[in-house]
Image (spheres, rainbow, N blue to C red):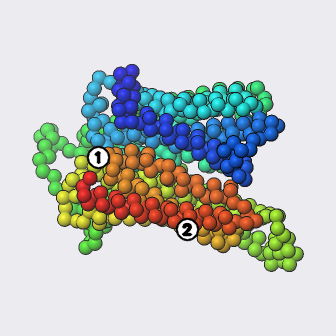
Amino acid sequence: MANLVWWELVRLARRGHTVRVRILLLYALLLAVVVFAFAEFSNPVPFFLGTETLPRSQIAGFARWLVFALLEAQLLFVALVTPAYAVAAIAEEKDRGTLPLLLTTALADREIVWGKAVARVLLVLAAVIAGLPVLMFTLLLGGVDVNLLLAGYALAIGTTILSGGIGIVVACLTPDSRTALIYAYIVSAVLVGGVIPPCMFLSPFASLYYLLETESRASQVALGIVYPLGQTMLACVLIQVATRGLRKAGVTSGPLSPTAYPESPRGRPDPVLVEEPEILPSGMGELGTGDPVLWKERHAKAHSVRWVTMLTAVTALIAMALFVRGGWTLVKRVMQALDPDEATRFLQPGLGSHDLAGVLLMFSGLIASWLYLLPLAVGVTGCIAGERLRSTLDSLLATQLDRGQILWAKLRTHAEHGLVFAGGAAAALGAGFGAEGGISLGLAIMAAFAGGIVLVVGLGAWFSIRCTTGISAFRYCLPATVGVGCLPMVAWYFTNWENPSSTVEVLAWCTGTFLLVGIVMAWRARADLERGD
């Protein structure tokens, strides 16, 4: 197993992943510093330039919350990056058709799974260690507890191991990389991100906040030592499950069942020399006279894992429940405003809303947007790279179909899939922001979300053509996907509800930028595919 771990690390380093992950972490920490500064001060530019300084009484509190923001950004980075790298360890072997060759070696299934899992986790942990000097620098400001830093890094290590275990087990139980990526992030969102209400209070992000606020030594030990150990034990259980499921999915399903070829009356099975295949698989409908690529993309769908499908349905039900609750609260607010006394109270400046209608609708739209954006990004980034990895791209491009038509059919199919989530997200976000900041703000966030979809599609298409594998393309497109998905929460946090015109202007600029970049990258993707680059 040690040889496999070493080979995986060397192969990842030769591909440049080691340096790339470290640079991404440093960018994430820098972005966290900038966002924290703008959240703490209305105009942090003089502090960055050194023309103004903080009073001594505020430096300790500022440093304490700055460390918390950096540790949270580090946890978020680990939770986003590790599942993709863990999934690639097994899924790429399946997509390339090299996993059966690996299974014929002297390595046992346990050694293969554990070796690949350890290598991917070590890759991310090396990047986490690279951010240690940045966090150690905050100790010079004073007021920072060293135990908080140690516990924060322990949580980061435990979260990395757990995210790696989730990616490995999903990759072993699913047939291809696209399905594995979607399911890995859904499971990671529940077990690590805590998107379901009972789990959010047990997530590592909430545990880090408890560490910041608690002064009990027993609580610090439980959150800083016991909690990461629990994550590690759960990851070990998942990897053990992955070991048993390595040969059960996709191309490693093993030989056919003996009943597939019934024995002849002589007692010896007759070999099947020629088997007439069906013209069309059952349940795929008529081919028709339309676009054949579009028909194929719409009907040739990967098999889904039942428990992950149920998890997606539960998440969608939570988003729907939040939408219904927030909508009913908004209706009651409108009914109360019909009363002259209540209307006068609502119009008084500085009071803000007295209910949670906007917050509930915003969170409903946020969950629905992730249910749409994540499968969209995975599907778009794998539309061309997946064909190249399966060695079917040359055959597809050798047909008489226009290459731009082929790309458009693939992008259209993935954009159409899950449109109900996109529509629900736009409606919920527009209603939530409109209820608190007016119609213009609601329309602005809806336009920004639509522009973000165009950005993800354009970037994903270009990365899918330029990258060798769909997982590599997805990793490059992941920052844009996260930015679009987190934009509503960031806009909600920084909006001045008494005067939201500045937020409307920023969202308008974001919409224009998203649309411009997305359209340009989609055009570049088509041009590159036409040239055959």
Which sits earlier in the primary sequence, circle 2 or circle 1?
1
Q: Is residue 131 above or below residue 308?
A: above
- Does 250 sit left or right of 494 as displayed? left
Label 2, secondary structure: give it: helix
Whether residue 306 appears in this view of the structure is no
- Between residue 254 and residue 408, name the one nearer to us: 408
Residue at 66%, 44% in the rendered image = 48
Residue at 64%, 48% in the rendered image = 35
Residue 446 in picture, x, y percent from top left: 57, 67
Say what amino acid the circle numbered 2 marks.
Ala
- Does 518 sit left or right of 315 as displayed? left
Say what amino acid the circle numbered 1 marks.
Leu
Q: Is residue 222 above or below residue 350?
A: above
Residue found at the very far top of the displayed protein: 2
Label 1, secondary structure: give it: helix
Residue at 52%, 43% in the rendered image = 80
Residue 66 in picture, x, y percent from top left: 69, 39
Mark 1 closeness class: few <14, some 14–19, many ≥20 residues within 10 Å: some
Q: Mark 2 points at which residue?
A: 447
Q: Quadrant of residue 319?
A: bottom right
User: Could you give the CA–CA distance between mark 2 and mark 1, rounded to whole angstroms?
Assistant: 35 Å
Q: Are discs 2 and 1 less than 8 Å apart at CB? A: no
Residue found at the very far right of the displayed protein: 341
Q: Mark 1 points at which residue?
A: 389
- Between residue 280 and residue 155, name the one nearer to us: 155
